[in-house]
Image (spheres, grey):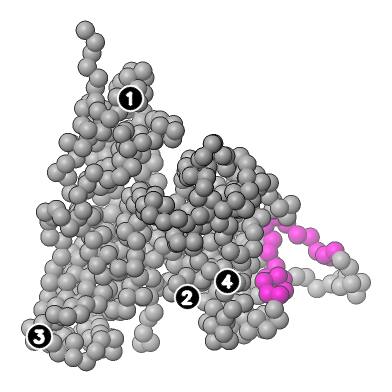
Amino acid sequence: MSTPWPATDIARLILDGFDRYRELFRQITQGARERFEQARWHDSQHAAAARIHLYEAQVGEVNSRLRQAFARERLLDVEQWPQVKAAYIELIDLRLDDELAETWYNSLFCSLFSHDLISDRCMFIHSTRPAATARERAAQTRSYTLQTDLQALLRAILADYPFATPYGDLQGDLARLEAQLRECLPDWVCKDPALTVELFVPVLYRNKGAYLVGRLYTVDEQWPLVLALLHRDGHGIEADAAITDEAQVSIIFSFTRSYFMADVPVPAQFVHFLKAILPSKHIAELYTSIGFYKQGKSEFYRALINHLASSDDRFVMAAGVRGMVMSVFTLPGFTTVFKIIKDRFSPVKTVDRATVIDKYRLVKSVDRVGRMADTQEFADFRFPRDRFDPQCLAELLDVAPSAVEVQGDTVLIRHCWTERRMTPLNLYLEQASDAQVLEALDDYGLAIKQLAAANIFPGDMLLKNFGVTRHGRVVFYDYDEICWLTEVNFRIIPPPRYPEDEMSGEPWYSIGPHDVFPEEFPPFLFADSGQRQLFSRLHGELFDARYWQGLQTAIGEGKVIDVFPYRRKAR
């Protein structure tokens, strides 16, 4: 008699691995409060990177355990995996993080099998979980009503969010928050007895800030609400800002930001709560924003296949100057670009394929300070051939034949990254008004400075490598030349030795592989002399090597420079 196929045992081992991952994820996340209270900013950065790397490490560990526990011919008999899926569904049925458990199962399946074998029979292409709103969920919010006055309401809120380090000036904070709310909201709202504030119970931590997130509503209207808290070393906790503008709150949860540390027992409910106050955000971005980037990847993929099923969109080449390393295409009705590495790079590029992959993966684990687009890496995307514009498909096959293959009626994309689609800055400036040019160039300079403050040097800072988001923010998105700022040798061009030196087509000084001369930036970055002069007035210090050297010194001394994800009011 043959031994029964061990479907339940395999499912149980996969779920045990998920429980282990969730516990380690929770431990890192729960440490965020203490790191904030003790102003341990470098530890916060290390914890953020460790939590991102945790997922793949734990998937690899469970893969090894499966291979050790079950005979290869039994474990890798894909025809039996519908039984594993059915057993797994039973095991996760009553969990409050069941959608994450499905994605974990998918990750294990993909680690064991070729992507050719991906199907809904064996894994969760579509979720089997009920919508969050249709399930009984544990309460994760607190509510506050306007019983006496607005400042009393705020006092009650801060009393419910104490820290081991006390507020440095609670009364001053309350007065500042009240003034900001009165400035941002209609007059009648702050007097309406029906005014209610609903806040998510767990605090969200990121970088040097802590955030209370929720909404403010009356009978007929609602506004998002974020209370931003800072720890001023030596001055205690400070309630820095009350933000009610949907666009500003959306930026706080932007795809250009690092992931929050938030202890979320019921992820689907919190994402549903965020979606209610930020309706323009896709749930994939919201899952990603709280650290569940693999779930964000699953939700993105489901949104993509649903879009293809419900539209006649065809893939086309993305607008902008063709890249020297990447080829970029997009779906006009879908807010994403797909980036594949070319087989041959422009001769001026000195990087290779492996280096480009490392650079893009690096971006996942660094502090993006709101100035670098998050990416998702995919392997073996399959799309119907008729969904490609013929010119787009021909170009992809020409520049990246190792990554793009036509298999009958299907196009196989072997490896790509996805990013949020933005308007390339060079194209934006061509159509912008004078006021928009001023604002965009100012933000372009701020983007470079804020990346530098986070120890990131973009390398290739050409306008075409930056994009403008729907909120008008300038964001860097081309990563093949990024490096740590502290690795760059910023130099002042030495004076010519002889008059003939200035006439020579060759430099009269040596140039090392890591040397950068900021004096050379103006003509390199700006072909338009008017834009060059305007940028010089706005951010001329970027053309001075001493500015960059000063940042390097500060970083070398261990300083973590403040970069705020919201507009701060003047003190």
What is the crowding at mark 4: few (fewer than 14 residues within 10 Å), some, or many (at least 20)? many
* Mark with earlier residue (4, 1): 1
Residue type indicated by callout 2: Gly
The residue beneath circle 1 is 79
Identify the element where label 4 is drawn. helix
Residue type indicated by callout 3: Pro
Alpha carbons under labels 2 and 4: distance apart: 10 Å
* Residue 58, position as x, y percentages in the image: 34, 38
The residue beneath circle 2 is 472
Identify the element where label 1 is drawn. helix
| Camera-nearest label, 3 or 1 | 1
Q: In this view, does 311 lie above or below 240?
A: above
Q: Give the range drawn in magenta.
A: 506-527
What residue is shown at x 56% (from left), y 49% (from top)? Answer: 340
Q: In this view, does 536 lie above or below 355?
A: below
Q: Are marks 3 and 4 in contact (CB under 8 Å)?
A: no
Q: Is residue 130 left or right of residue 506?
A: left
Alpha carbons under labels 1 and 2: distance apart: 51 Å
* Mark with earlier residue (2, 4): 4
Q: Return the residue found at the far top.
A: 1
Numbered badge on residue 193:
3
What residue is shown at x 47% (from left), y 57% (from top)? Answer: 313
Viewer-closest of 79 and 313: 313
Alpha carbons under labels 3 and 1: distance apart: 62 Å
* Mark with earlier residue (3, 1): 1
Q: Do the residues labelled 3 and 2 touch (CB within 8 Å)?
A: no
* Mark with earlier residue (1, 2): 1
Q: Is residue 13 magenta?
A: no
